Image (cartoon, helix red, strand yellow):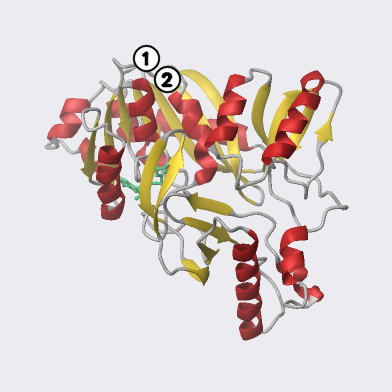
């Protein structure tokens, strides 16, 4: 199986032993993968459903010698998917054990509902009814082993359409898709079937929130969703935020999340196509023009098509655009830099300074979610 990048905790080697005990206590190491070492550092593979948890983030934040990175895992051949496999004993033919997903996303919180979203290998020659039955058996085993999960959904599509949602099918547990997710002391009410939300972006949201935004800054969150960036920035940085989205459900939840997180005086949200900001008669567009200190463009598949909006709203030379995009092999960062530069030139703008270009995570085999933090002129 072609393994995708996973999150590792990178720790200075001499400090790693004391930390290892803490990890075993908190059960955060993904034992399916090998711990990697070189002369200076140790890389601990993290459980996918755990590295987003607040207590872990807090431990990492307090220790400057630790850092989260993404990298290709190496399978730990000694490890077998013990718990789930144990649960499936006498319930599933051992020929089908390879179908057990190796990782899954968890959305929700203990106080609300917790959903696991799993994905099965695509090509299999098992007859469809048999396959569906196997998937259900595996999902029930996952529920039995992870008592804090209420439902297991199968990912039936990639993110699609303007709203960037994906089709999900309930395999086991309650038929309910609304929950409240907790992240970095913020609460996000959302429906996993109706809006975009990715727990895997937790570190990116933290990076932006801690990137020097201050209370005098004005932030434009162009593709705000349920407010995953906006709310964290409002709470941490106290800045003024304009958040927009084209999905009515996203805006409905964003409005609720603004109240739940008590940031009513910081965020104003709009149900709109952000391209409308460029219309001559759009009052909001006229008001925001060249005044934004930060612009977040988290619409990776199409962000390039909206660069003109950002260029017209950003404070020239000073403001920073956080530009997310999908880029492929062989040189994903070089490719995206070139694409960005060419588009700017076409729009009659130029780069003042590129502050960051990096891979955020794997998007699909050979494709990456990348981010550029850029000042333009
Ligand atoms: C990848 S999601 C990001 C959501 C949020 N920023 C997050 O990180 O959780 C992109 C969002 O952009 C919205 N969107 C897509 N096209 C848009 C447009 N033309 N104008 C405004 N919002 C748009 C989608 O509805 C979706 O919620």
Please name whichever residue, 97 or 260, is drawn nearer the observer in this view of the structure: 260
Against 341, residue 227 (above or below) is below
- Image quadrant in which the C terminus is located: top left
Q: How many marks?
A: 2
Element under disc 2? strand
Please name whichever residue, 22 or 333, is drawn nearer the observer in this view of the structure: 22
Q: Are marks 2 and 1 in contact (CB under 8 Å)?
A: yes
Seen at 71% across and 35% down, the residue is 23
Residue that numbered label 2 is attached to: 375
Residue 178 figure quarter:
bottom left
Seen at 59% across and 61% down, the residue is 118
Does residue 272 appear to the left or right of 87 in the view shown?
Answer: left
Could you tell me how far apart the alpha carbons at marks 2 and 1 are, in whole angstroms? Answer: 6 Å
Residue 1 figure quarter:
bottom right
Determine if the C-beta at disc 2 is less than 8 A from ligand 1.
no
Does residue 5 appear to the left or right of 286 in the view shown?
Answer: right
Who comes first in sequence, dot 2 or dot 1? 1
Element under disc 1? loop
Location of residue 330 in the rendering, given as x and y in whole percent from the top left corner: 69, 41
Residue that numbered label 1 is attached to: 318
Location of residue 315 in the rendering, given as x and y in whole percent from the top left corner: 31, 19
Please indicate, yes or no, whether residue 307 appears anywhere in the rendered image. Answer: yes
């Amino acid at each position: 199986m072609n393994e995708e990048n996973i999150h590792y905790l990178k720790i200075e080697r001499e400090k790693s032993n004391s930390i290892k005990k803490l990890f075993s206590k908190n059960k955060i190491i993904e034992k399916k993968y090998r711990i990697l070492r070189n002369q200076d550092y140790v890389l601990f593979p993290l459980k996918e459903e755990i590295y987003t948890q607040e207590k872990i983030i807090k431990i990492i934040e307090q220790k400057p010698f630790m850092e989260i990175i993404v990298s290709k895992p190496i399978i730990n051949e000694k490890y077998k998917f013990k718990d789930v496999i144990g649960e499936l004993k006498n319930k599933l033919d051992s020929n089908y054990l390879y179908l057990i997903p190796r990782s899954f996303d968890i959305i929700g919180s203990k106080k609300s509902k917790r959903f696991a979203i799993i994905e099965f290998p695509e090509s299999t020659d098992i007859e469809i009814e048999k396959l569906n039955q196997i998937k259900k058996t595996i999902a029930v085993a996952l529920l039995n082993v992870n008592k804090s999960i209420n439902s297991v959904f199968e990912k039936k599509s990639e993110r699609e359409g303007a709203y960037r949602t994906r089709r999900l099918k309930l395999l086991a547990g309650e038929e309910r898709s609304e929950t409240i997710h907790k992240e970095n002391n913020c609460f996000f009410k959302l429906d996993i079937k109706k809006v975009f939300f990715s727990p895997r972006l937790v570190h990116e949201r933290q990076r932006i929130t801690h990137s020097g935004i201050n209370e005098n800054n004005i932030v434009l969150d162009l593709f705000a969703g349920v407010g995953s960036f906006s709310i964290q920035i409002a709470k941490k940085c106290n800045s003024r935020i304009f958040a927009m989205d084209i999905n009515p459900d996203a805006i409905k939840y964003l409005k609720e999340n603004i109240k739940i997180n008590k940031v009513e005086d910081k965020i104003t949200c709009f149900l709109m196509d952000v391209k409308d900001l460029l219309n001559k008669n759009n009052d909001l567009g006229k008001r925001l023009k060249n005044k934004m200190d930060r612009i977040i463009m988290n619409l990776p598949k199409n962000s390039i098509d909206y660069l003109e909006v950002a260029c017209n709203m950003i404070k020239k030379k000073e403001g920073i655009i956080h530009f997310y995009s999908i880029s492929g092999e062989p040189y994903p960062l070089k490719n995206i830099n070139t694409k960005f530069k060419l588009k700017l030139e076409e729009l009659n703008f130029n780069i003042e300074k590129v502050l960051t270009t990096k891979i955020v995570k794997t998007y699909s085999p050979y494709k990456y979610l990348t981010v550029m933090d850029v000042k333009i002129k």
